[in-house]
Image (spheres, rainbow, N blue to C red):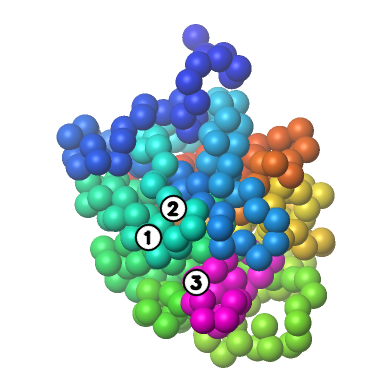
Amino acid sequence: MLPLPFSGITTFARSTHVPVNECGGVLAGDKPRIAVLGVPYDSATSSRSGARFGPRGIREASLLLWGYNNVQKVAPFEKLDVFDAGDADVVPVDIRATYASIEMATSTILSGGYRQLTLGGDHSILLPLLRAHAKKYGPLAVVHFDAHPDTWDLEYENQPYSHGTPCRRAIEEGLIDVEAYFQIGIRGPTGGPEDYQDALKLGARMVTYEEYRRLGAKNLLPEIHACVGPRPLYVTFDIDAVDPAYAPATGTPEVGGLTSYEAIELVRGLKGLNMVGCDIVEVAPPFDHAGITSILAANLGFEFLSLWAMQPGR
Ligand code: MN
Ligand code: MN
């Protein structure tokens, strides 16, 4: 019998809860293991906060994921052992302490042989996630869905870390392989042309939403596949890549972005790549209407799990 979507304790898609410190391999089975980690941190946002409630909102919406992906023809929860590792410890007033905690939790999970789907949190959390993944896999190809390049140098005086800077910091630290770094969905007004110029100078292949509309998934996806090839790939999905008409619950919305279907289609199109980690960030449920943003985020999580379930040898 299928479980009731409105009853029971809330973990991601009803997966078994395994605390981070128990993700050391004790549950070894023969299926690939995935840990879902929440990071309820939003103190690095530049406008409205609320993404600290993202992991809870997405988990709740995930209770309606029935399990079979009819487009990809795969049942990820049968192919994979998916566990919910709960939330990383965060310190709202201390981003450095929070970064250390996120990196430690992620490193623990990766060392146990799991791959990690992270639920944010604002986008500042990307940096410690990339630090932990690059420690294991080396510099990473990155597909970065966002309305914003997140490559500012300093968003606040003398503060290197905020949700507008993680990609520049990651490039400076050598965590991103800039030969294979895609930004998709970039749009909206900026302070000047430098925002985009800086990202391009750092080596990003920036696909503005306008360019995406010209190319379409049918041209963009082959370009991504040809460029990324077998490199270890990290996918980071800032929900504001999606139009606020479809995903209003976010801190810094920009009009005129991806539709829900376009977002899902692009993620599905990453099938076959060597994705080693992924996240969904900037979901801020206090600004949601009828839960639509959380429902989309939960479904993106389901598509990520489906990609893992279809990887060769997994
Ligand atoms: Mn972002
Ligand atoms: Mn953004």
**In percent of the image, x 46 and y 29: which residue is there?**
11
**Residue 129 visible, this angle:** no
SS type, badge 1: helix
Q: Earlier in the sequence, mark 1 or mark 3?
A: 1
Instruction: Indicate the position of residue 47 as horizontal and vertical percent values.
Output: 70, 62
Real-space Cα distance between discs 2 and 3? 14 Å
Classed neighbour count for the residue bearing mark 3: other residues with Cα under 10 Å, few (<14), some (14–19), many (≥20):
many
**What amino acid type is highlighted by mark number 2?**
Val
Q: Residue furthest front?
A: 93
Q: Earlier in the sequence, mark 1 or mark 2?
A: 2
Disc 3 target residue:
161
**Number of the front mark, 1 or 3:** 1
Q: Which residues are magenta?
A: 144-166
Q: Is residue 191 above or below residue 262?
A: below
Mark number for residue 91? 2
Is the residue at mark 1 in contact range of ligand 1, meaning its CB lies under 8 Å from it?
Answer: no
**In percent of the image, x 82 and y 62: which residue is there?**
256
- Main secondary structure of the magenta stretch: loop
SS type, badge 2: loop
Q: Is residue 16 above or below residue 253?
A: above
Instruction: Indicate the position of residue 178 as horizontal and vertical percent values.
Output: 46, 80
Q: Is mark 2 in CB contact (under 8 Å) with mark 3?
A: no
**In percent of the image, x 61 and y 61: which residue is there?**
45
Real-space Cα distance between discs 1 and 3? 12 Å
Q: Nearer the viewer, residue 28 or 40?
A: 40
SS type, badge 3: loop
Q: Residue furthest top?
A: 1
Say left or right for 90 vs 214: left
Q: Quadrant of the C terminus?
A: top left
Q: Is residue 304 above or below residue 151?
A: above
